[in-house]
Amino acid sequence: MKRFFANEDGATSIEYAVLAAMISLAIFAAIGGLGDTISSSYEDTAAKVQDATNR
């Protein structure tokens, strides 16, 4: 039983999995924020083009 609890191989794998999950969440958050910015930029450009063509 002591050998089972002393073995840290599984703990290292779990640490890497948690680290990968945290990095993934950070990437998704950054992409989500960037997507909103790009969408807003396209909407502003479309409105300006529409205003320019309606004159």
Image (cartoon, grey):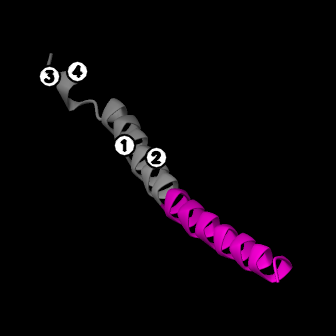
Per the rendered image, the range of residues in magenta is 30-55
Neighbor class of circle 1 (other Cα within 10 Å; few <14, some 14-19, many 20+) is few
In this view, the mark in front (1 or 4) = 1
Task: Give the residue at x 85% y 77%.
Answer: 53
The outermost residue toward the top is 1
Q: Using the image, tell me which numbered label, if any, was put on residue 18.
A: 1
Between the C-alphas of marks 1 and 4, the distance is 22 Å
In this view, the mark in front (4 or 2) = 2
Q: Using the image, tell me which numbered label, if any, was put on residue 20.
A: 2
Q: Is residue 34 magenta?
A: yes
Neighbor class of circle 4 (other Cα within 10 Å; few <14, some 14-19, many 20+) is few
Of 26 and 7, nearer the camera is 26
Q: Which residue is mark 3?
A: 2
Of 48 and 55, nearer the camera is 55
Q: Is label 1 in contact with label 2 (beta carbons under 8 Å)?
A: yes
Of 18 and 24, nearer the camera is 24
Amino acid type at mark 3? Lys
